[in-house]
Amino acid sequence: MLNKLIANILPFMPKKLIWVFSKRYIAGETIEEALLASKLLNEQNIEVTIDLLGEFIESLEEAEENKNQYLEIIERFTSDSVKGNFSLKPTMFGLLIDKEVCYNYIRQIVELAAKKHSFVRIDMEDSQCVDMELEMFEKLRHDFPKNVGLVLQSYLRRTHSDLKKLSDLNSEINPINFRLCKGIYIEPQNIAFTDYDEVRAHFLEDLEFMFKNKMYVGIATHDKFLIENSYRLIEKYEVPKNRYEFQMLYGVTPELRQSIIDKGHLMRVYVPFGNHWFNYSTRRLKENPKMANHIIKALFIRG
């Protein structure tokens, strides 16, 4: 209860105070800071996926600005030979304002990534966005089968059905590239599973379907139970190392992350950066109130 109280109060505190906590989980505000963080991860045999923070914008001017920033990000990161790819949220490009403008902007980003022999993943957002984001992914995959991927959230009741439909797009030459995560948005019970063990069970059910159908999957979790069961499924289906990877958030569970690397699995870290770090940080705090203990230690206990 105390952690939840702290988590609810902190978003109303001064940003400088929140930054004390956030800097562990955010690469910085600038491209230069994100480049430095990514290169340091590369030196640890970790690949990255770069994410410019900001979502649910209010104007198409913001959408165009975000598009131009992503084009610059791709130019900079590929020219510096960073081992990684890119993630984006469609609401940053006006998905809920003008769907066609959003699609055209994201298509320009994926097209540039394809020219640079790179890859863009479309993040899945809350339930109001799911159908539009699935439609967008299918259109982009038709033109860029090797350069675009998608996120699926195991806590949504519809996800396994969506997965079966999307399997029609899969091929041996160009397997669909998914990131599978639990899901973070607050949804009603008729839309999402809310029981912790139930979400875990559906995560593993979706993962097994992906392995059985020879899709590529980014196993995105910090849950030891899910990681151990992922190992089991990898062994069961004899999944080759070029058909999966593990993914984690920047700054989260570094010891667990290293244990996965030490076992010889590919690890990719989600590297968020940008001026809109505040909303990202407070959302992460609300989804995991136990972080409040770390914040209090960071604020009041040196070392």
Image: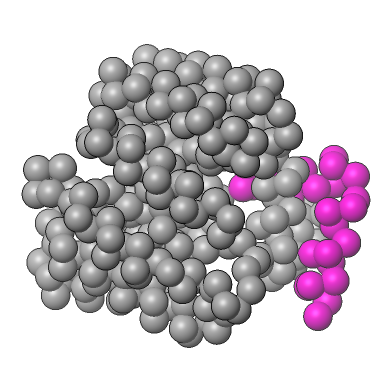
Tell me: residue 12, above or below residue 278. below
Report whether residue 235 is seen.
yes
> Is residue 146 shown above or below 215?
above
**What residue sits 26% from the left and 30% below the top?**
143
Which residue shows up at 56% across the image and 59% down it? 127
Magenta span: predominant SS is helix
Do we see residue 294 in this rendering? Answer: no
Q: Position of residue 294 (x, y in %)?
A: 71, 62
Tell me which residue sits at (85%, 40%) in the image: 16
Q: Residue at left 74%, top 53%? A: 282
Q: Quadrant of residue 110?
A: top left
In the displayed structure image, the side of residue 88 where residue 142 appears, left or right: left
Q: Residue 301: which quarter of the image?
A: bottom right
Measuring from the top left, give residue 158's x and y in whole percent. Answer: 43, 69
Whether residue 45 appears in magenta in the rendering, the answer is no
Q: Is residue 248 above or below residue 190?
A: above
Residue 259 image offset from top left, x and y in percent: 35, 62
231 shown above or below 105: below
The quarter of the picture where the N terminus appears is: bottom right
Magenta span has 23?
A: yes
Colouring scheme, one of rainbow, by chain, secondary structure, one colour = one colour
Residue 276 horizontal/vertical position (percent): 71, 36
Q: Nearer the viewer, residue 188 or 112?
A: 188
Q: Which residues are magenta?
A: 1-28
User: How many numbered discs?
Assistant: 0
The quarter of the picture where residue 45 lies is: top left
